[in-house]
């Protein structure tokens, strides 16, 4: 008796094949990893805190691929675009969009923190605060605007590809792409080689992403085990209001941008659900940069627009960090009993527009950017950061999630404005009609989508001879084909029978 026959009457059991397919999906694996990591960190805090290397190792694996992926994408895109003016136009539109959306995010955070006032009533004595225990980056002097601009120029051309800063990679990639474009036929062979190299790199990325559930498990176990839920409970009002503000920004502001460009936000969020779960587990947006580039290209955005806009957004379009800066700085002032006037808050906002970019390449960029802001204005002491250092990990998840969605929406918007977005394909992809995994496989192998055409029908005599030989020599295959499950998953033609 089969397993299904043994089931009780009236019960419905899920087919084992469907469960296996569900568990094979990356976003399901990441969700299981996040939930399991949270459980381990809560039940065994000391053991969970020791699992941090799992998350760090996964992030390091992806980080080593970011520079070459950006280089190949940007170089091939610019070399194929054929016009330096078009590249400059895309860059200008992207930067204008970044500044406008970043300012809107900061203003929204400023309004919410003044209405909710999560820090009022704490009455913290500034003399009891100390900078001990804070990361060194939070207390050291921060670079000026000129130093920040000069830091985008690498020491040598190869050194840009061996560092962890995105802006030097962008600079070298843009210059190299222009050079190939100007070289004409001499650069055509190199351009084709770069395209082939990018396919190899994305294959490696696909392999590395199989480790994402393990990285999400280790990072979440470390977060809960090291900081605990008690830390979160004491400052729940700040964390809760920040998450809700970030959610409001994504649904209302970014949703409005998608609507203006003829697309919908919720299907886009479903499309990148795997990336969002990876970001939630690792509290970092870096691991999903290469995969986001591939998915946006698959959604119909041109490679040059994706290669320029998305990596630049990781430095200039940190919407989640923008909300965090205004809410965090005003919260600290409220906790210390410092009454900031509207002019003082607006002056802090102007400083934040610069500091949010200056710390973009630093791990934990939001907390470092907040420290840079407090050190640049005299209103709130830097030592006040000790009040929120323990909960920053919980807020960094919302920062990273908001920034990833914001950069994805920005890339689609800029592509639409440039006429470099296949809108019909974008809608079909977001509706799930063109799955990412299947299309990416065919793109890498240059095979046409859809079922392959059957071979030409052989002559009748040849067909009869083949049928008789198959009946005599391929009995095992015929028996295997008789199994419906095996036949459904087989790619070979059914075994012919003699008539």
Image (tube, rainbow, N blue to C red):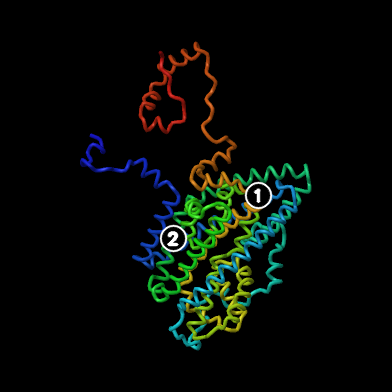
Can residue 476 be seen from the camera position used here? yes
- Determine which residue is flagged by label 1: 419
**Where residue 389 appears, x then y in whole percent?**
48, 75
Q: Secondary structure at mark 2?
A: helix
Q: Nearer the viewer, residue 449 or 283?
A: 449
Q: Secondary structure at mark 1?
A: loop
Q: Nearer the viewer, residue 90 or 45?
A: 90
Left or right: where does residue 38 sit relative to residue 200?
Answer: left
Category of crowding for the residue at label 2, using alpha-carbon neighbours closer than 10 angstroms: few (below 14), some (14–19), many (at least 20): many
- Determine which residue is flagged by label 2: 218
Name which residue lies at 58% across and 38% down: 445
**Where residue 132 appears, x then y in whole percent?**
51, 80
Q: Quadrant of residue 308?
A: bottom right
Q: Nearer the viewer, residue 479 or 15?
A: 15
Residue 313, disc: none
**Where residue 414 appears, x then y in whole percent?**
63, 55
Name which residue lies at 46% across and 80% down: 119
Can you say whether 408 is above or below 353 in the image?
above
- Disc 2 or 1, which lies upstream in sequence? 2
Can you say whether 116 is above or below 188 in the image?
below
Given this view, does label 2 or label 1 mark the residue nearer the observer?
1
Category of crowding for the residue at label 1, using alpha-carbon neighbours closer than 10 angstroms: few (below 14), some (14–19), many (at least 20): few
Number of marks in picture = 2
Marks 2 and 1: CB-CB under 8 Å?
no
**Where residue 120 appears, x then y in whole percent?**
45, 82
The image quadrant where one finds the N terminus is top left
Q: Quadrant of residue 42?
A: bottom left
Name which residue lies at 66% across and 62% down: 95
Give how far apart the Cα atoms at labels 2 and 1 are. Answer: 42 Å
Can residue 159 be seen from the camera position used here? no
Q: Nearer the viewer, residue 22 or 61?
A: 22
């Amino acid at each position: 008796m089969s397993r299904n026959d043994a089931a009780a009457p009236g019960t419905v059991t899920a087919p084992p094949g469907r469960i296996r397919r569900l568990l094979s999906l990356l976003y399901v694996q990441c969700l299981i990893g996040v939930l399991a990591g949270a459980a381990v960190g809560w039940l065994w805090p000391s053991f969970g805190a020791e699992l941090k290397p799992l998350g760090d190792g996964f992030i390091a694996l992806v980080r080593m691929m970011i520079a070459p992926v950006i280089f190949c994408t940007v170089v091939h895109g610019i070399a194929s675009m054929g016009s330096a003016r078009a590249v400059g136009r895309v860059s200008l539109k992207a930067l204008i969009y970044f500044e406008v959306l970043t300012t809107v995010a900061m203003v929204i955070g400023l309004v919410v923190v003044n209405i909710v006032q999560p820090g009022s009533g704490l009455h913290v004595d500034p003399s009891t605060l100390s900078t001990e225990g804070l990361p060194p980056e939070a207390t050291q002097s921060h670079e000026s605007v000129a130093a920040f601009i000069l830091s985008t120029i690498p020491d040598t051309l190869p050194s840009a590809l061996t560092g962890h800063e995105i802006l030097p990679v962008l600079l070298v990639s843009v210059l190299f792409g222009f050079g190939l474009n100007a070289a004409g036929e001499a650069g055509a062979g190199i351009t084709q080689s770069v395209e082939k190299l990018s396919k190899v790199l994305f294959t490696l990325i696909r392999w590395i992403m199989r480790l994402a559930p393990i990285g999400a498990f280790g990072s979440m176990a470390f977060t809960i085990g090291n900081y605990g839920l008690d830390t979160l409970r004491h400052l729940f009002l700040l964390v809760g209001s920040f998450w809700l503000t970030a959610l409001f920004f994504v649904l209302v502001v970014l949703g409005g941008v998608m609507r203006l460009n003829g697309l919908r936000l919720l299907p886009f969020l479903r499309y990148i659900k795997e990336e969002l779960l990876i970001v939630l587990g690792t509290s970092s947006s870096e691991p999903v940069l290469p995969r986001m580039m591939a998915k946006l290209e698959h959604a119909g955005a041109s490679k040059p627009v994706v290669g320029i806009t998305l990596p630049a957004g990781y430095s200039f379009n940190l919407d989640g960090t923008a909300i965090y800066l205004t809410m965090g700085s005003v919260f600290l002032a409220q906790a210390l009993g410092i009454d900031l006037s509207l002019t003082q808050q607006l002056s802090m906002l102007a400083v934040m527009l610069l500091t949010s970019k200056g710390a973009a390449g630093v791990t934990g960029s939001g907390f470092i950017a907040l420290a840079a802001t407090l050190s640049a204005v005299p209103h709130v002491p830097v030592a006040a950061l000790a009040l929120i250092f323990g909960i920053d990990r919980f807020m960094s998840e919302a920062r990273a999630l908001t920034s990833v969605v914001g950069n994805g929406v920005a890339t689609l918007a800029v592509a639409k404005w440039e006429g470099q977005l296949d809108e019909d394909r974008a809608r079909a992809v977001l509706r799930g009609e063109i799955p990412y995994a299947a299309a990416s496989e065919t793109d890498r192998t240059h095979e046409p989508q859809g079922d392959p055409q059957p071979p030409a029908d052989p002559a009748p005599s040849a067909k009869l001879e083949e049928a008789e030989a198959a009946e005599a020599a391929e009995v095992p295959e015929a028996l295997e084909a008789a199994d419906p499950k095996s036949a459904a998953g087989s790619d070979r033609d059914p075994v012919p029978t003699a008539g």
